[in-house]
Image (cartoon, grey):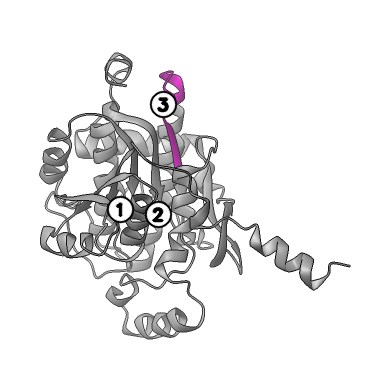
């Protein structure tokens, strides 16, 4: 039987922010970095020595957030709900980029559209990051980490609506959010496949925070869900620093491409970061290829040619 002391020792060995290796000389971009999981991720990487770019829709809020960080940071404007902004951000990038963290997202919001006419959750959470990643990929030297969610596997309700990606006439906040989070995992799967086929050493990984208390829950379209989530934030949720651990683990540990990281306890809602499973739908290479093709058509952005990746990296 395990003793109390052995249990304590086991808990001490769980991965935490203090296990991040020296990041000196590395450059990272974190989208949606002015609050919540984003600013916690920025702070941890900067404290470990990385230079971190806060890619944010509101530069003023980004600058305010940057003042709370102990380390080398800068703020650049990026609106993932506007492909022109995504292109502008990518076109302005010069030099190597070790780490791209696709963290930004919206959740369960009332029906709305991006500037390009896409359903807001699919357009921001998936298409914006799809375009950003492919446009920046010639500069990326290490890995791309994209945030998904346990919502990608809600029983019976999560799928990619290929016949109606914008959910026109059938919009549901939760269905739209679940679709976007499933898309994040399929994107990671196909991105890793393409990187491997191109002979690139860059890796694509995914992570989810479990239940982390952030401002996302306060924007839910349902008053009842907002109330329930407010209670859950106080009773169940981790804080943003704990919620950022799976992202940081995926960003800094030596993991295989296409790995998926989440909390290891309480139904993956909280705990230390560990490799976790995904739904069958999120593991389907056929759907991943189909989604990639649809995303290319919608955004006009494609995976860069091998020669371009080889020259820049």
Mark 1 element type: helix
- Badges 2 and 3: C-beta atoms under 8 Å apart? no
Residue 129 picture location, percent across and down? 28, 45
Per the rendered image, the range of residues in magenta is: 195-205
Q: What crowding class fits label 2: few (fewer than 14 Cα within 10 Å), some (14-19), or many (20 or more)?
A: many
Q: Which residue in the structure is indicated by mark 2? A: 181
Is-magenta flag for residue 197?
Answer: yes
Q: Residue at x 28, y 58 (%)?
A: 121
Q: What crowding class fits label 3: few (fewer than 14 Cα within 10 Å), some (14-19), or many (20 or more)?
A: some
Sequence-earlier tag: 3 or 1? 1
Mark 2 element type: helix
Q: Quadrant of residue 61?
A: bottom left
Above/below status of 15 relative to 233: above
Above/below status of 34 relative to 159: below
Q: Which mark is residue 125?
A: 1
Task: Name the foreground residue: 47 vs 272.
Answer: 47
Q: Is residue 59 left or right of residue 2?
A: left
Q: Which residue in the structure is indicated by mark 3? A: 194
């Amino acid at each position: 039987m395990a003793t109390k002391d052995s249990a304590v020792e086991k808990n001490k060995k769980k991965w935490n922010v203090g296990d991040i290796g020296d990041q000196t000389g590395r450059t990272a971009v974190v989208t949606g970095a002015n609050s919540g999981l984003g600013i916690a991720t920025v702070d941890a990487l900067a404290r470990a020595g990385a230079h971190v770019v806060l890619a944010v829709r509101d530069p003023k809020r980004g600058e305010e957030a940057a003042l709370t960080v102990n380390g080398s940071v800068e703020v650049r404007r990026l609106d993932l709900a506007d492909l022109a902004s995504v292109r502008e951000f990518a076109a302005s990038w010069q030099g190597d980029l070790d780490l791209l963290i696709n963290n930004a997202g919206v959740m369960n919001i009332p029906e709305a559209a991006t500037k390009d006419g896409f359903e807001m959750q699919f357009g921001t959470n998936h298409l914006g990051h799809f375009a950003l990643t492919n446009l920046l990929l010639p500069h990326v030297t290490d890995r791309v980490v994209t945030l998904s969610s346990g919502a990608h596997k809600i029983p019976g309700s999560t799928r990619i609506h290929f016949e109606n990606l914008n959910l026109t006439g059938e919009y549901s906040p939760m269905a739209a959010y679940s679709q976007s989070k499933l898309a994040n995992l399929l994107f990671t799967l196909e991105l890793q496949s393409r990187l491997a086929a191109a002979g690139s050493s860059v890796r694509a990984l995914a992570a989810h925070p479990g239940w982390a208390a952030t401002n996302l829950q306060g924007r839910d379209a349902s008053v009842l869900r907002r109330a329930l989530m407010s209670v859950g934030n106080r009773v169940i949720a981790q804080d943003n620093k704990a919620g950022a651990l799976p992202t940081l683990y995926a960003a800094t540990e030596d993991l295989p491409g296409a790995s998926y990281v989440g909390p290891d306890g309480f139904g993956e809602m909280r705990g230390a970061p560990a490799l976790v499973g995904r739904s069958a739908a999120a593991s389907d290479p056929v759907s991943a290829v189909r989604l990639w093709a649809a995303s290319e058509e919608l955004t006009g952005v494609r995976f860069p040619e091998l020669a371009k990746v080889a020259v820049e990296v």
